[in-house]
Amino acid sequence: MRTKQENNISESQIEDALVANLVFLAKILKVPADIKLIARQLKLKSVGERIDLLLSSGKHLCLVELKVVGFSNDWLKQIISYRDELINLQNAGELVSGEILCFLLITDAKEAHIKSAKQNGVEVVIYQPIEALKNYYENLATVAPFLKMKPNDYGVFNIGLINRTLYEIANGAMEQENIALKINLSKGSVRNHLRLASEFDLVRMRNKKYFLTDRGDQYVQNFNKNTTIEILSEKQIEILKEFVSKDPFYSPYVFGIYSIIESAFLLARNFYPVQLTDLRKVFKIISGKESEWQAERSLNTATYTFLNYAIDLELLGKIGQQIVITPAGFRFILMLQLHKSIEMIESLSTNKN
């Protein structure tokens, strides 16, 4: 039942959150963490009502009535009637035997209310709905890491800068120091190139040696032969675009590209072309870097980097201080949204199971 109140969230949604993490519920109830769900919204024939939650805890049964408002004698009478009905079912052999522990979860209660409930064998548990929903999010993030994914910045401002490093790997140079010598760059720069390449699934490392993945091998075979190696060929762009669109949460860097394009897309609904100053602000929020990119320089550098990547992939364009989404970019966003939704749904299903 949805009631007008300060907590504008339904009881069923809090119930969903608690059932998804019984360990957290056990902590609230102060019972052993091995509680198990017996039934949810169990209909009682004699009273025509439904029990919110019925759980087992060792040799005990836990009857839980959940509210998103403060104490009321009506709630107390309700849970007592539920308990009486369960006892009748036990006596009739229709419910497993065991002492029934009653818990009334509410958001507020006076000391007199708590004492009165206890005298009637009901434990009043004061909880905050926001904490239950916060815990649900934290728990979900363990099986859906993308919820807390944030882009990294390795200081490589264009994707094509990694091409020389990959070229040397393809020609047998597998160690970072050796690659650095061959292309006359510092080991730090090469390390950053390799990090970026790994986040695009182009290279893998084993025993401090680097190898091209199948995708990396395909990427190298399609180097631009008609111009400088740092300029991406059309085929390389397609390889990376397909990868990012199908797995936008593969790595923090891939997520950064997704975030900058998503930011431009959201802004375009309000005004178009998108202003670079607005893109910076929204990108910081979409990417989850509100606290990390507080310094203007950090935000500018990160926006510059990931905007360049999106431009490299021909998904965004920059004209002066205005940002546009290319025709390929609009098609890409639709594909991106599709795969993002699929991954989110799969993660939620995993959490539910």
Image (cartoon, rainbow, N blue to C red):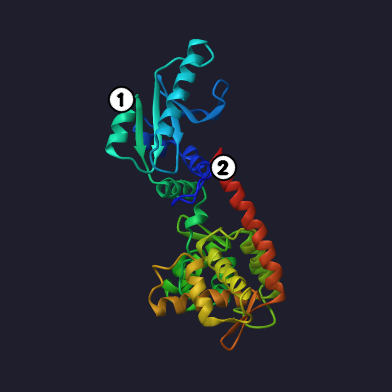
| Residue 88 position in % (x across, y down) | 49, 14
Label 1 close to label 2 by CB (< 8 Å): no
**Disc nearest the viewer among 1 and 2:** 1
Q: Is residue 17 above or below residue 62?
A: below
Q: CA distance from mark 1 to mark 2?
A: 42 Å
| Residue 42 position in % (x across, y down) | 55, 27
Which quarter of the figure has residue 56? top left
Which quarter of the figure has residue 271? bottom right
Residue at x 49%, y 19% (from the top left corner): 85
| Residue 340 position in % (x across, y down) | 62, 57
User: Label 2: which residue?
Assistant: 350
Give the class, few, some or many, for how many residues have Cα within 10 Å of label 2's Cα (few <14, many ≥20): few
Residue at x 58%, y 21% (from the top left corner): 45
User: Label 1: which residue?
Assistant: 119
Specify whether residue 203 is in view.
Answer: yes
Q: Is residue 325 above or below residue 134?
A: below
| Residue 322 position in % (x across, y down) | 59, 84
Secondary structure at badge 1 equals helix
Q: Is residue 73 above or below residue 176?
A: above
Farthest residue in the front direction? 73
Q: In the image, is 271 to the left or to the right of 190?
A: right
Secondary structure at badge 2 equals helix
Task: Return the residue nearer the eye: 282 or 87.
Answer: 87
